[in-house]
Image (cartoon, helix red, strand yellow):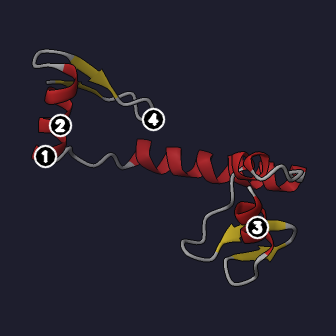
Amino acid sequence: MDRLRASLADPAEVSETDGVRRWRSNGTVIGPHVFADAFVACPAVQREAYRAELDAFAARERAHPRPLSEEELWEMRSEFGRGTTVVNVLTGRRTRL
């Protein structure tokens, strides 16, 4: 918790623009769950930016779904069993294993 709280305040790890904090490592908006885990209040603008980023990601995934690799199919068959239908919760695409 203390380390996470320190990370949220560390300019080497976090950038802030218009009140929205992003991880410097990948440029993504820091999620409200991180603030909760650090016992730090999450500003409304942060929650709104996080939701907008998630919505944009989901829209891109729905618009341009990528095919599953043989490795992904193998792992899914191993986990769920051959013959099972798996549904991607973002795209709605159904895959029969």
Q: CA distance from mark 2 to mark 4?
A: 19 Å
On the rendered structure, is 82 left or right of 30?
Answer: left
- Secondary element under disc 4, as helix, strand or loop, is loop
Residue 37 x/y as whole percent: 73, 47
- Secondary element under disc 1, as helix, strand or loop, is helix
Residue 90: numbered disc: 4
Residue 62 x/y as whole percent: 42, 41
Residue where numbered disc 3 is placed: 8
Counting other residues with Cα less than 10 Å from the Cα at mark 3, is it few (<14), some (14-19), or many (20 or more)?
A: many
Residue type marked 4? Leu
The count of marks equals 4
Residue type marked 2? Glu
Query: Which-is-in-front pick, marks 3 and 1?
Result: 3
Residue type marked 3? Leu
Residue 71: numbered disc: 1
| Residue in the image at 61% along x and 64% along y | 28
Quarter holding the C terminus?
top left
Q: CA distance from mark 1 to mark 4?
A: 20 Å
Q: Are marks 2 and 1 in contact (CB under 8 Å)?
A: yes
Q: CA distance from mark 3 to mark 1?
A: 36 Å
- Secondary element under disc 2, as helix, strand or loop, is helix
Q: Are marks 2 and 4 in contact (CB under 8 Å)?
A: no
Q: Nearer the viewer, residue 39 or 17?
A: 39
